[in-house]
Amino acid sequence: MLDMSWGEVMLIGGVALIVIGPKDLPKALRTVGQVTRKVRRMAGEFQMQFNEAIREAELDDVRKEVDGIRDTVRGASGGFNPVQTIRDELKGAVEARAPKPSSATLADATAQLKSAESAAPTTGGAYDVPKALEQPVAQPVAEVQAAPEPLPVPGSVDDPYGPAPDPTPAPHGPAPSAPAAGH
């Protein structure tokens, strides 16, 4: 706190004992403790009020920013409707793709059909049927291929890697001898 060593504290205590006297020293120390407690409490309250004022100032700044954003959104919301904008764009795209028939083009198309019908020879039916082909077209016949040669069975005589090894392993060392009968 005040960076005093034990020697300095003892020196101050000795001077206080001589100046104040042994009879009034406990009262003086109690009063010094109470004053120190009050000073600390006042310093803590001041620091708390100072921090609260800073928080309120920051909060006021934040409130002002939020109000500004809110006002901007309210001002822009009258002219901005995303659903209506999408509807308008889709309607414009559909109308641009669909050609509007005009009476002149419809009349021209009807006249062309009538002239084509009158110029075409009637063969008894309303539709032309294609004539059968004079010569039959020969279709190419797929060549029959010989069946492929079957693959060799592994371990057989035809296997290019040779016959399979004997599944029973050969014993190591001399073969055990059979006990002689009759001994």
Image (cartoon, rainbow, N blue to C red):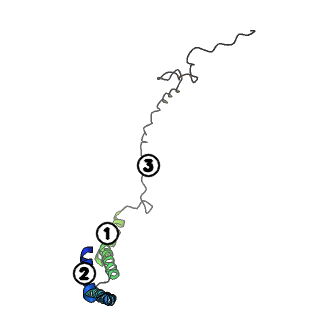
In the rendering, at what x and y percent does residue 58 appear?
26, 85
Residue 36 x/y as whole percent: 29, 87
Measure how far apart labels 2 and 1 are at the Cα level: 126 Å
Among the two numbered marks 2 and 3 on one chain, the one whose residue lies closer to the N terminus:
2
Residue 87, compared with residue 157, is above or below; it is below
Q: Are marks 2 and 1 in contact (CB under 8 Å)?
A: no
Q: Name the residue located 29 percent from the left edge and 84 percent from the top edge.
A: 80
Place of residue 182 in the rendered image (x, y in percent of width and height, measured from the top left): 75, 9
For the residues marked 2 and 3, what is the alpha-carbon distance in whole angstroms? 135 Å
Which residue position holds label 3?
132
Question: In the rendered structure, which disc, 2 or 1, sits on the residue that comes first in sequence?
Answer: 2
- Residue 121's mark? none
Q: Label 1 neighbourhood size at 10 Å, few (<14), some (14-19), many (20+)?
A: few
Label whose residue precedes the other's in the sequence (1 or 3): 1
Residue occupying image coordinates x 42% and y 51%: 131
- Residue 146, compared with residue 105, is above or below; it is above
Mark 2, other Cα within 10 Å: few <14 / some 14–19 / many ≥20: few
Q: In this orientation, which residue lies closer to the viewer: 102 or 85?
A: 85
**Who is closer to the viewer here, 23 or 61?**
23
Residue 123 found in image quarter: bottom left
Which numbered marker is on residue 112? Answer: 1
